[in-house]
Each structure stands twice: as structure tokens, then as C-alpha cells.
Image: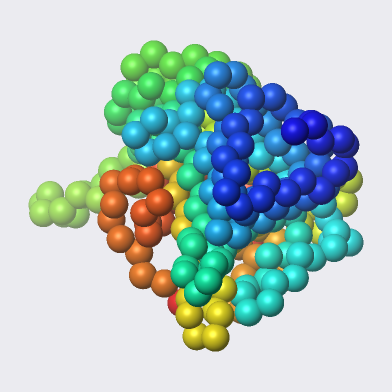
Amino acid sequence: MLPPSTNEVVQIPGGVWMILDVDPPKLKRLFIYGALEVEDTADRSIETELVLIQGGSFIVGREDAPFTHKFDLILHGNHLTEDQPMYDAPNCGAKALCVYGTSARDSPIPGFIDMHGVDVGKSWVKLGKTANAGDTTIELTETVNWEANSEIVLSATSWEYKETEKAVIASVSGNIITLTQPLQFKHLSSSSSLTGGSFTFYQQAEVGLLTRSVRIIGKDYAEQEEEQFGARVLVAAFDKFGTILPGYGRFSNVEFVRGGQEGWSDNYDPRYTLAFMNSGDHEDADGAPAAKESYVRNCGFNYNYNSAIGIFG
């Protein structure tokens, strides 16, 4: 098979299991009716306008074997990008990763997304000591194994929600994190007790790790903040004469960067960062291949233009 050229529409037909061991050029659209598995031998990336899986599989690591290198799925586009319409199924839209089922001779064939990055451990920890504006170190209540150059978020503890801020880790030593730049705002870690000490309550900022090794990225562009048009991920189903043909999505330790599309929130087309729609019953299968299982575990949602996660039907 010849490698694709720039801005080409690529189709992986049913019955074909393709291993990706190179970085392809920037694509127009990628349709997966068979399987595409990213080989875990080096850092990889795919840039395209849209990925549509229909009765196929898109695999970047597995639950019991996470992807140990870095992988970026970069989805580009804007408000003028042509939608991918679907018949008898929720609209896929644009700047999107979508999965649906299909059928062959009236036999249902589910679609699957498996994306699993390296486990980052605990990703949300409380601030152990008040951090003031200008500080370059913060103290947590627990030790973490977060890596240098990772991005974190500190929640606001004042009345002003905009004092939530992001920072970049320079180094970690136990429960002490050194930052690359001083904090802009004060973040509290304090406690107060009722008279007599009958009850103590705490006001502590939350510190969350945003960075993951596997990322789904809405590519930035000049009018991004005006249009608020990020990437969307849709796990949905076809309704073929009353027969549900579902897709399934399993995401663990995945970072969603600039996700969601502002203005679409109706339950027939919710352009959330990640939406599950009408995809039927699910089971707890411990990550078994081809299982009717969907979940979101220990993922980071790094800037959204709509709600982060939605479940419909």
C-alpha cells in the first residue's frame, strides 16, 4: 500500500488491520472500517480534519498495555469546515473523532476506540499550605510522581473564579512542586473550627495534573477564541430500522486539549468535548478486546469551549 499524500482522504476497509509505524502527512479525513493500531515503538502523531470509525477499531494502547510513548491526534478545522453528516445516527460534525457501529448481513458490528496513556497516578491533590501570588513553589497534602514540564491547574479559593490558573512544573520533590513561573494569585489552604471545636471545616485549593502522554488536540487557529471551535469526540450508534449499532470508547490517562464547540448543546447534537449518545448498554469487561465497554478514567480536560463530558440515551 502506498503512503498517503498531504490532504488526502484515507479509508481503511473492513477486514484490514493496519499498523501505523510512521507519522503520516496532514490528512483531509480518515475513515476506519477495519482497524488502525498505532505501534508503540516511538512518539507518533496524526493530523486530520476528522476521524470516523464505523464498525472498525482505532487503538492507541490498551488497558493492560498503555501506550508508553507520546501520541497526538490533532484535529484541525473551524466554523467553516464542512460537517460530516450521518444518516440514522447522531451528526459527526467537523473537527471530530467519531465512532459508530455498522452491520453486515443483518449482524451488528460494533465500533471501538481504545486510547490509553501512561498512568499518571493520582491526578487531583489538595494544596497543603497556602500559596501566595509570586510564589514559585507549592506544597501538596500528598506526594505525587508528576513529571517536569507537565501542566497543572490550581483552583481559585476567592470569590473570583478567574483566579483559577495554570502553571508548568519545573521539578517535583515528594509533595513539593517547583514551578517555572511565579503564581499570579493567592490559593488558600486553611481550616476553621466551630466554637468548642465540635466541627472543623477546610478551605483548600485543588491542584490537578492536566498533562498526559496521549492527547486529542483541537488545533489552534487565529480566530479560535472568537469562534470557540475545538475538537469533539463522539461515541454514538446507528439506528437501523430499530436495531441499535453502537460504538464504544475507552479512554484512560488521555488529555483533551481545546475541546468542545460552543453553541451546540442540544441533546441531538451536543458538541461537548466528549459525548456518549444512544450507544446502548455497556458492561464491565476489564478492558477485554472487542467488549461492549465504555469508560473515561483519569483523563485531563485542558480547556473546553463546551461541557467536558455528556451522556445521552
Asked whether residue 161 appears in the rendered view, the answer is no
Q: Nearer the viewer, residue 65 or 74?
A: 65
Residue placed at 32% from the left, 23% from the top?
143
- Report the colour scheme: rainbow
Quarter the N terminus occupies: top right
Q: Position of residue 221 (x, y in %)?
A: 85, 45
Q: Nearer the viewer, residue 293 or 21?
A: 21
Residue placed at 41% from the left, 56% from the top?
294
| Residue located farthest toward the front when viewing the structure as drawn | 105
Q: Position of residue 175 (x, y in %)?
A: 35, 21
Residue placed at 36% from the left, 25% from the top?
144
Q: Can you tell which quarter of the image residue 80 is in?
A: bottom right
| Residue located farthest toward the bottom when viewing the structure as drawn | 241
Q: Nearer the viewer, residue 199 or 153?
A: 153
Asked whether residue 191 appears in the rendered view, the answer is yes
Q: Nearer the viewer, residue 16 or 21?
A: 16
Q: Position of residue 279 (x, y in %)?
A: 47, 69
Residue placed at 35% from the left, 64% from the top?
282
Could you tell whether 16 is left or right of 220 in the image?
A: left
Q: Is residue 267 above or below residue 53?
A: below
**How many numbered discs?**
0
Could you tell whether 305 is left or right of 178 in the image?
A: right
Could you tell whether 177 is left or right of 233 in the image?
A: left
Could you tell whether 290 is left or right of 210 in the image?
A: left
